[in-house]
Image (cartoon, rainbow, N blue to C red):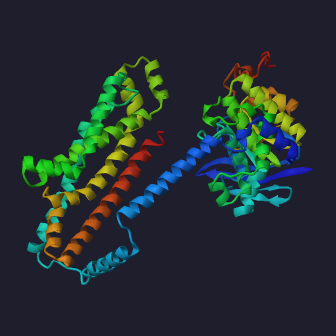
Amino acid sequence: MNVTEKEIAHYRAQVPHLYSEPLQVRLQRAAVWVGIVGLFIYCLIVFDFSPARIMTGVERFGRVLSFMFPPYIWTSWFEFAPILEGLLETLAIAFLGTVLGAVIAFPLSFLGAKNINRIPFLRHTTRRGYDVIRAFETLILALIFIRAFGLGPLPGILAMAVSEIGTFAKLFSEAIENTSEKPVDGVKASGGSRFQTVRFGVMPQVSPVIISILLYNFESNVRSGTILGIVGAGGIGFLLSDRISAYKWDEAWSIIFLIIIMVYIIDWLSAKIRKKIIGEFGDTK
Amino acid sequence: MTALNISGLSKHFGTTKAVDSATLDIEAGQFVGVIGRSGAGKSTLLRLINRLIEPTEGSVSFDGVDITKLKGKALRQWRRDCAMIFQQFNLVDRLDVITNVLIGRVAEHGVLSSTAMRFSDEERTMAAKALDRLDMVPFALQRAGTLSGGQQQRVAIARALVQNPRIMLADEPIASLDPGNATRVMDALRTINEEDKLTVLVNLHTLDTAREYCGRIIAMRQGQVMFDGPAHELTDAVVRDIYGADGLDDFNEAVTSTSVGNRPRVAA
């Protein structure tokens, strides 16, 4: 297909924006880029990201890393038992927090989904509710709950559950909104009630997504659960921060290694579970 | 002159033989229709030719070049030469029409110009010309996802045209279109075949469309080529055999017809 200058001129005259975007669009785009790059550089300057500071930091970090060798090995069961207990406690906090959050978020998520809750006022109120909950970081919630419930795993579990309610409700309701209307119409046309359209039309579409979200957030909670201990909300984090503040870097590093191994195993397991479950459901998109 | 040579071509999915030692010679400039029931291997055959899937056995050659052996750049150039349009149009819904058409030029572009989605004025004009042939210029700046099915298929044909293809494959291009749009799309393919002397190979569900447009019809059943000849030789006995309609007393082409104004043919 050969193109002549005349043809180029013809189509340029007919639809000029085929060849270049409107000036306004180009200006807007340039302005956005200048804004982002400018803000980035400004922040670097304000926080004094000077190469000299980075260099000294890296040097000191190297020293901290060197404490890893030789690695600390727990020799007696008496010494190792609390570590193991801490790890398991972190796992338990993550598990309970995730399940509790999901159980409460599940019904709430339907209230926030456009295709289920057709009353805009109620839906928007619910959604703002999710936002308010999500505005509290787990760590802040933990600090508040420790005041109320005392030290230990209980405030940790509650903090995790509450922050997960916000996250789960938002993610679940988005999954519900992203379902196809077609199966729903199929159920409705067969004489299904409102509840039945949800049960037979919507739920089979969302359940693989929900399971995937649950598994991912459980993983993520195992990771963030280690931090909760640092503020006194139970788990391995308490032991870790204790060793760090006592300058027992070798033992601290060994604990960090154990945490990495635990998180890795959870990641691996949940990937397997996800593959099995999503595979069974087929491609429900 | 033979353009496309298919010899002993097979594709197995596990124990299923989707295409079972198909051998065909297609001459340059022919308008060939491939018919057969769902699962007969029509789509697999087209995908094998375009190398979207790899054959289990056999070979496909075009103008003497064995395309089943192509790799890397040569393979991408073959895919450009052998344009394909799909039942579900396979456009990028979120991109505008002109960019969708310009995707037909990607084989000529490297990583840098593709990242910036940068195309030359000549290419943009090629795209505009292709859209003009299909009366789609007024929609050029609209998002492809906002168009109707018939319009989307015409954009897909325009994308195929700017590839400067040597052969055009169409995988059930009208199966999800209403009769009016189906006619426009088939007419566009016919025009391309006649004006550009382009070989067209099209999978069809509707027999009367195949009879109407295709000089030559190939019928497949269970992966094998069962019939290959001019449209008038496709008798009802052959059709019954291909579609396995033994149990159906009133096998009637008019039931599946999507043509406008065609009175039902009476089965002889």
Front residue of B18/B198: it is: B198
Residue sitting at x 47%, y 28%: A181
B39 left or right, relative to A90: right
Task: State whether residue B224 appears in this view.
Answer: no
Instruction: Report whether A152 appears left or right of A6.
Output: left
Task: Name the quarter where the C terminus of chain B is drawn.
Answer: top right
Farthest-out residue, bottom: A70
Image coordinates for residue A57, horizontal then vertical, percent: 32, 75
Q: Is residue A53 visible?
A: yes
**Residue at screen point 73% across, 53% down:** B79
In the rendered image, the residue lying farthest to the right is B1
Q: Relative to residue B24, is residue A283 drawn left or right?
A: left
- State which quadrant residue B133 falls in: top right
Q: Nearer the viewer, residue A223 or B57?
A: A223
Give the percent coordinates (x, y) of residue B42: 71, 41
Residue B43 x/y as whole percent? 68, 42
